[in-house]
Image (cartoon, rainbow, N blue to C red):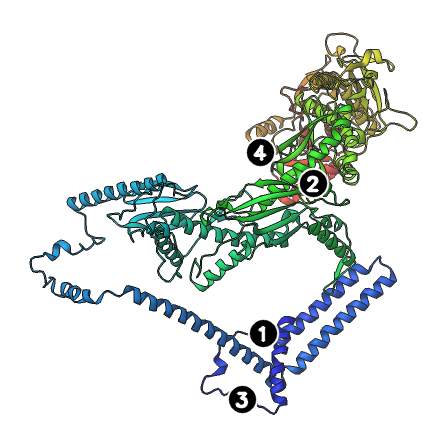
Amino acid sequence: ARCACGSVLLRSCSVQACHSRGLELRFRVSGFKMQGLPRHTQTVKLGELVERVVCSAHDDLVHLASGASGRAETDRKRELARYLHTLRQRLTRLHVLAEWAPVQRRARIAILCGDMVGQLKQHDRAFADTADRLFGLHQQMGWARAPLFDLPGALDVLCNGKYSALHSASIAEVAPIPGKGEDETETAFELEQRLALEQRLDCEMRSMLLDEKVKGTLPEGVLVWGVKGGTAIVGVPGEYRATLGLGGPPPLPKPVAPGDELGAENPEPEFETQTPPHGGWLVRRIELLAGARDIDEPSGTPPRPFTITKLENRVLGERATARMAGMSPPPPAPPELVENGAEGICGLHRVGRDAALRLVAATIAEQTKRVALKGGAWFGGAIRVEPIKGRKDASLASTAGDFATQKNNGHGHGSQVEKTHGKGEGIRVWFWLPGASRTLGASGTRLAGVDVGSVEVARGAAAANDAAVAAGSAPRIELLYEKGEDAVDARIVARALVPAEGGMDTTVSCTKECAVEKIPFDMSSVDVREALADGIRFASLCKLRNVLDKIQGPCEESGLFMALDPNATRPIGDSQTTAGNKSAEPNEDGWGEQARPAIVVRLTENGTCAQVCCDKKSGGLVVVGVHRIASSAYAAALAKTVKQGGIGSLPAALTGLVRAALESDLRRAMRTKGLAPVPSPRVLFRVSPGTAWPFDGEPPCAAAPVCPSSGGLFVAVFVTKSASTNAKTNTGDPKNEEPSTSGLRARLALIRARRVTAGSVPGPATWLSLTPEGRDFVSGDSTDTCEFTVTDLDSVASAMAFAAKTAAVAAQRLAVSDWLEQRNVAFSEFRPIGAGGDLGKPTIAWNAFVDDNQKQLVQIELVLAGEHGVTLTVTGLPRRAASRSEKTARNFSEETDSDSGRPAAPGCAGVAEWTNSGDGNFSSLKIVYPGEKTSGDGAVEFGVGAACADAHRVVSTRAFVWRVENQLPKKSESASLSVESVEALSCVVACGGRIVRVGWVGPSGPTGGLAAVGLDGLDDEKKETAVSEAARVGDVRALAEALATK
């Protein structure tokens, strides 16, 4: 808005000057009707301008108020003063503009003057274009006119159909045969003639192409795709492809040298140029194969070839045809100077390559500007683009400008005089500039269009970049135009230049020596990002070679072995959180899935490796692959250490990764054995104050919960270094060196860490050592019986899996005891005393009352069998006589298909079984929960919890039955609440012809409760809600009243 108003204000100055001299400008509507001119001047409404100023001032004020909290009083006053000063300037400009615009229609006069100037400029361009076209038409008329002596004979033949001067000649024999129409069919004779002509043309074109090859005039890289049907397909892959035929102008002979005119003898006679019987080469169509990929698209997107208009295609064909014959092209192409006669395929190659180079040059210039402005992966000022200026000849940038200008003028390709491009001109792109790293972390805000708080940082970064570019201490790539011996050999090459070892460090003076490497550049898919990435790869390779020379010795002394891989890819994460998910992998170095140079460091003998790479944006050292073997916090701390310490911090950082890699390998091996390793055992487990972990005091290297996990029992492995590790000698041969994990000792243990809930932090841990096989417990801390050498992680994982399987009974016992302790229930525990029957298995028993008087006592026993499941037995249940309507309820339950009509079933696929006592007064309920049938089916994990919950459901249902039978007064048979059936985990009650099933729903706690579902006679939703609420609170009177209500 300010730009538009400023232009109006400047244009009004000339009008005011005319008024000051006494002149008067009057624009009459009659005549040319100035008011109807096309609009060329950009305008904006005064109301919209005022609204913009007010909205901008409000937004700046809100931003200032939101950022003022927490700042010093002086800073807040300074920012407020700056805001008020800026707002005052804006309002002053707005006031001046509002006062100036309506006076004597100044704004309207200025707009009209601007429209007049724009219209006159458009007329000027139209007149210039018309003059150029008339000049070209004049030349065409001069070239197209026939000789005067031939006009009478041509008119005689066209008008009379005969030639009067030659009566015996047959006009039909010499006159051209008109072509066939689209609807006309071709006769057999005409088909035979056409095929014979095409065969002659094919033979002649093959002969001409063979002559080109024998003479050695066929340019390098030109490919003949085929000769068929009277046409030949010739071109260069990735640049252009032309369809050639015969019928063009005959080739002109090569000019005679001055020595040949005097009769000098040529030692090597050249091939004679003969006029082809069917004419010279004729270019029918040219297709450009060169293309580009937009920098906003992914790197894998197919490139789009350059497109040209029909006029440009025709002009290119005429230029190529004229070049191949040694002539200057006809209009509208400007004339060209051809000095060496007919050029043949070389002339076609000259025109096709020139067109492809011009489009590629324009694309490179446009892409480099966009990459430098937008940044992409190198955002933050880490890239700088500059043209390479050498000779006075056309550079790559000027070539792009010339092509764009010619396209705008409608002339296509070509120029008045053929340009002789110089060598060494192009575009240079600097990367890894030191100023980019200095801008990281710079704090600043933007207030009223002014950067506040970061001006000094930005100036320092720009100064550092200028110094690095001036000294040549930063790596760069160059896209150069190389001419070769002839313009036909012109091409665009790309190369990367990396300063010497001293130049890579911006803290020391840089030398002029640089390592130069040619990088691939494909004209069929022009993408500056790919060329820049290849240059960064070469710079990374040079830097990593220097890093490897400095850290290889200290790392090998610590047992680490490394090698430089020029095309390494990021290791795929195999951690529990990012396994198989590439999108979840962190991109530490900015390369993603692309290949790049890296120092591959072997951490364990199982092949776990880490990579030392160069960051794509800044060039700093980055350790890649830490997230897949360690936690995110550890990876962030290591990245910060390497960033601050540089090369000197790498040996210690890589050595510290050995234990993390060993833990990762252990977790991987544990998952293959069916265990679920704990992600961070160092953080999960803690010891009581004043105590330390066993063995060497280090936390467990890896741990996995024992099923059921609610028992809080874990099987863990502790890994420490043996005493012989410190005395290891270096043999100097990497093949004979022991891996970094050799000499490590491992110990198995069971850890008890109790949790209140599944999501709470475990309490202080206690432990018990195991034998290396994971079978038996070890008393004390005897290292002779519990230590073993870590040689095969699979054996360690197998021992842990066996220990977890063996300790399943202990975990079940702990889970049941914790469940009972949380509910303040007294229980007794029976340990095995025999090998057969239930007495040979651990059993936990407790009692429960099912009446309010605490007289009816039931006994509950839970037999624990580990992986074979658990068995729940409830004895002492009073036996009831079958009700008269029990059969009706059972039949109703069997006929319905809904879940509401079925009896409540035990959890975790348990099977219930009723048995009666010897005297017939009591019955017992036995529910068997099967063990694990397939790996990971959850039977062992959830079987104990299901058994405890079902025990609570059985007792709750029996207590409800007792209340129904003992707390209700005796009424008539039709209105009394009666228990129709008592099932394993639910019961069926009836009242007044309405039947409901009552059972416990939800967990055994405050969040669960009894619920009722209607089986028959509960059609009303309100009545069903009242019945369910009465059953939930256990009020049998309210339940009876709700069922009896009509």
Q: Amino acid at mark 2?
A: Ala
Residue marked by disc 3: 26
Q: Secondary structure at mark 2?
A: loop
Q: Secondary structure at mark 4?
A: loop
For the residues marked 4 and 1, what is the alpha-carbon distance in whole angstroms?
A: 74 Å
Q: Against 54, is 955 above or below?
A: above
Numbered disc in front, either 1 or 2: 2
Q: Residue at x 23, y 53 (%)?
A: 182
Residue marked by disc 2: 500
Disc 4 packing (10 Å; few <14; some 14–19; many ≥20): few
Mark 2 or mark 4, earlier in chain: 2
Residue marked by disc 1: 43
For the residues marked 1 and 2, what is the alpha-carbon distance in whole angstroms?
A: 56 Å
For the residues marked 3 and 1, what is the alpha-carbon distance in whole angstroms?
A: 22 Å
Residue 726 horizontal side relative to residue 661, left or right: right
Question: Do the numbered discs 2 and 4 sit on residues whose CB atoms are within 8 Å?
Answer: no
Disc 3 packing (10 Å; few <14; some 14–19; many ≥20): few
Disc 2 packing (10 Å; few <14; some 14–19; many ≥20): some
Disc 1 packing (10 Å; few <14; some 14–19; many ≥20): some
Residue marked by disc 4: 898
Image location (x, y in percent) of residue 476: 64, 46
For the residues marked 2 and 4, what is the alpha-carbon distance in whole angstroms?
A: 81 Å
Image location (x, y in percent) of residue 535: 61, 42
Front one among 438 and 714:
438
Q: Against 345, is 369 above or below?
A: below
Q: Secondary structure at mark 1?
A: loop
* Quadrant of image for the C terminus: top right
Q: Secondary structure at mark 3?
A: loop
Q: Amino acid at mark 1?
A: Thr
Image location (x, y in percent) of residue 642: 77, 37
